[in-house]
Image (spheres, grey):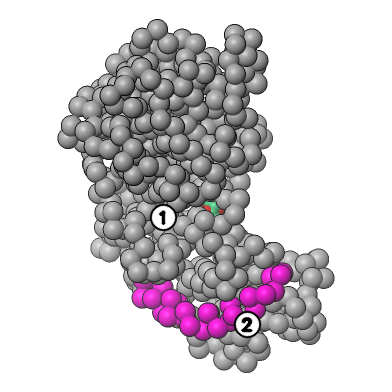
């Protein structure tokens, strides 16, 4: 959730570091800093500049002509210690010769700090990370890699670390355990970052470090070895994402851009994965034989936040299509529950980033008990993608806004494909499979139609923007969409919103209904439509304003609701695609109306790599 960047080469390091941090800002954004080796003066303390606030604060504090061609940088999302200049990374030892940036949590930092203080170390911050700098200095005998290895032996917890020493010009040493770290291989220059976006402007050749690996790099060389010092043969991957994919492309913010990209990102998730002739799906990455697929008796989804909501929709799809029982589990609950792993159960770890600590640790826990886990991830090469037994990349492209939108609909696409494949290995007929694919083919156009409600949604957002409480109500496959609509609004507008099963409402939540509290109803087109209409009437009878999202030709709902958002009619099973889009836009426009920081809402970070 924090971001790391490192550079060594012939160019001015500070510029590359600050630019890299700007690209990483979405990962964490309460303070930032850089440390650069002073060129002419090996052995003198490092130049360290740190600032509370966004990267812009750091940028204006860094002298334009700061010399030095090797350095490290960090953007922080506070876990231990408040948001202050002192707590910002990099952290240094007493001599100022060692600088360290760290993502993750050092669980035994209190004990280490006490020991180091007894040895004379003076701490300048309240962070857990600072112990690493003092430990490295303690062990330093002229070889930074050796010193870092010695320090790592004392650390309990998770880390992605980059470290420099002023006595070793041009060298960066890094290590990973539970927090991502990627080496960027340039021509006569090297990069180290927690995320490829930080270096994409300079190189596309990358090497993903695995847990318990250490890298040592200079401008034209790098080597990787594990903690036991066994050399690791590096596998160089090529990044295909374009930098412009990460730019805003004329939209006011990333979230708006990402919402409007969904008519392209969903077909990307489906592309090449539909077998029209056989009425089924082709998912090569699953690493499961037909026999193994056929033997699956139940499915469990592990995920957090929006990805969990995708899992709830997925549970509905898989159950109704393939007739296998499915439970979507909150990763943060599962990992501490001493879970029972039943035979013939397929686990699905769903995660946009592929780095969410709760999901990753829950996945490892069930793997330890013999479970087969497939990943449904967006970020290629992410930890969950690499550690799972197979999986589906959703290919939504980089998602920069903290609030997840396009990754969600791409995760849904992955579930529809998996549902089709599983169903065809069970009971679904060829004709039904072909019909299902036809319906899936129509989804990108339907998403375009849903996006075309933009102006209507914006007007509704303006009308209700000052409401402090909102209800989102849905049934069946639209119940998770109600949860997701409420989460989106909360995250970026800070209004209180509650997602509720429309049938469950009468058991308590209806007490919240009054003239100031809008209820957003997601109206299904199938057998639950009438029931939902009754729920709308119950709210209307109590004076609550109703915003309804329904098929555009549903005149009855249009006349009942105070405000109506008509989306293209699709089969009830596919309505999550068309109904979530206006809810994403509603959250976006309400937040805009309230002047919120849409892409970087308070207290949140894009990828939650701590508990
Ligand atoms: C909500 C949101 C979060 C994430 C959650 C899991 O908009 O973005 O709730 O969905 O933190 O993240 P991933 O999918 O990266 O595991």
Left or right: 98, with 221 as reference point: right
Q: 523 or 403: nearer the eye?
A: 403
Question: What residue is shown with label 1?
Answer: 399
Q: 314 or 578: nearer the eye?
A: 578
* Start-end of magenta stretch: 443-471
The structure residue drawn at horizontal position 37% and vertical position 31%, both measured from the top left corner, is 36
Indicate whether residue 608 is drawn in magenta.
Answer: no
Left or right: 591, with 570 as reference point: right
The structure residue drawn at horizontal position 58% and vertical position 62%, both measured from the top left corner, is 492
Indicate whether residue 463 is drawn in magenta.
Answer: yes
Left or right: 218, with 95 as reference point: left
Question: What residue is shown with label 2?
Answer: 463
Q: Is residue 545 above or below residue 222?
A: below
The structure residue drawn at horizontal position 44% and vertical position 32%, both measured from the top left corner, is 48
Mark 1 crowdedness (10 Å alpha carbons): few <14, some 14-19, many ≥20: many
The extreme left residue here reads: 187
Give the secondary structure at mark 2: helix
The structure residue drawn at horizontal position 59% and vertical position 59%, both measured from the top left corner, is 491
Q: Main secondary structure of the magenta part?
A: helix
Residue 230: give x, y in percent of width and height: 32, 13
Residue 355: give x, y in percent of width and height: 47, 40
Residue 425: give x, y in percent of width and height: 39, 52
Give the secondary structure at mark 1: loop
Mark 2 crowdedness (10 Å alpha carbons): few <14, some 14-19, many ≥20: few
Q: Earlier in the sequence, mark 1 or mark 2?
A: 1
Q: Is residue 564 above or below residue 159?
A: below
């Amino acid at each position: 959730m924090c971001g790391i960047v490192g550079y060594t080469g012939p160019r001015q390091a500070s510029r590359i570091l600050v630019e890299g941090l700007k690209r990483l800002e979405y990962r964490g954004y309460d303070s930032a800093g850089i440390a650069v080796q002073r060129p002419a003066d090996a052995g003198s303390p490092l130049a360290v500049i740190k600032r509370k606030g966004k990267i812009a604060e750091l940028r204006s504090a860094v002298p334009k002509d700061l010399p030095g061609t090797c350095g490290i940088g960090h953007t922080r999302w506070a876990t231990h210690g408040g948001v202050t200049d002192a707590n910002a990374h990099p952290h240094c030892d007493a001599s100022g010769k060692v600088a360290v940036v760290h993502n993750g949590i050092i669980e035994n930092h209190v004990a280490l700090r006490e020991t180091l203080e007894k040895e004379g170390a003076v701490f300048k911050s309240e962070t857990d990370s600072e112990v690493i700098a003092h430990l490295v200095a303690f062990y330093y005998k002229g070889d930074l890699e050796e010193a870092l290895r010695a320090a790592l032996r004392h650390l309990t917890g998770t880390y992605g670390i980059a470290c420099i020493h002023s006595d070793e010009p041009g060298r960066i040493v890094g290590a990973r355990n539970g927090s991502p770290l990627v080496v960027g291989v340039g021509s006569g220059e090297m990069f180290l970052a927690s995320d490829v976006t930080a270096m994409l402007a300079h190189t596309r050749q990358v090497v993903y470090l695995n847990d318990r690996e250490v890298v040592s790099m200079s401008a034209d060389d790098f080597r990787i070895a594990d903690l036991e010092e066994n050399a690791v043969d590096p596998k160089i991957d090529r990044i295909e994402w374009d930098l412009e994919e990460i730019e805003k492309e004329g939209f006011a913010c990333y979230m708006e851009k990402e919402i409007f990209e969904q008519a392209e990102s969903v077909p990307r998730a489906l592309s090449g994965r539909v077998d029209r002739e056989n009425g089924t799906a082709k998912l090569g990455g699953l690493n499961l034989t037909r026999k193994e697929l056929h033997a699956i008796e139940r499915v469990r989804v592990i995920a957090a936040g929006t990805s969990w909501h995708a899992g709830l929709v997925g549970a509905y799809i898989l159950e109704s299509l393939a007739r296998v029982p499915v439970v979507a589990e909150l990763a943060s609950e599962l990992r501490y529950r001493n879970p029972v792993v039943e035979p013939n159960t397929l686990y699905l770890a769903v995660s946009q980033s592929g780095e969410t600590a709760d999901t990753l640790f829950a996945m490892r826990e069930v793997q330890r008990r013999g479970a087969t886990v497939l990943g449904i991830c967006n970020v290629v090469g992410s930890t969950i993608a690499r550690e799972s037994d197979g999986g589906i990349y959703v290919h939504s492209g980089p998602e920069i806004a903290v609030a997840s939108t396009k990754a969600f609909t791409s995760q849904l696409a992955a579930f529809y494909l998996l549902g089709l494949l599983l169903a065809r290995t069970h009971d679904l007929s060829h004709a039904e499979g072909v019909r299902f694919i036809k319906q899936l083919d129509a989804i990108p156009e339907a998403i375009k139609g849903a996006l075309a409600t933009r102006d209507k949604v914006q007007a509704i957002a303006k009308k209700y923007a000052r409401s402090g409480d909102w209800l989102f109500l849905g049934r069946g496959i639209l119940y998770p969409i109600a949860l997701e609509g409420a989460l989106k609004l909360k995250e970026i507008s800070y209004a209180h919103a509650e997602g509720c099963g429309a049938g469950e409402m009468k058991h308590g939540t209806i007490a919240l209904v009054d003239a100031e509290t809008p209820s957003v109803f997601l109206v299904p087109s199938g057998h639950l439509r009438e029931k939902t209409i009754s729920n709308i009437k119950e709210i209307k009878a109590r004076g609550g304003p109703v915003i309804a999202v329904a098929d555009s030709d549903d005149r009855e709902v249009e006349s009942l609701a105070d405000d109506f958002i008509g989306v293209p009619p699709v089969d009830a099973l596919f309505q999550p695609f068309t109904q979530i889009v206006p809810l994403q836009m509603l959250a976006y426009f309400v937040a805009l109306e309230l002047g919120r920081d849409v892409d970087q809402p308070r207290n949140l970070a894009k990828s939650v790599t701590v508990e």
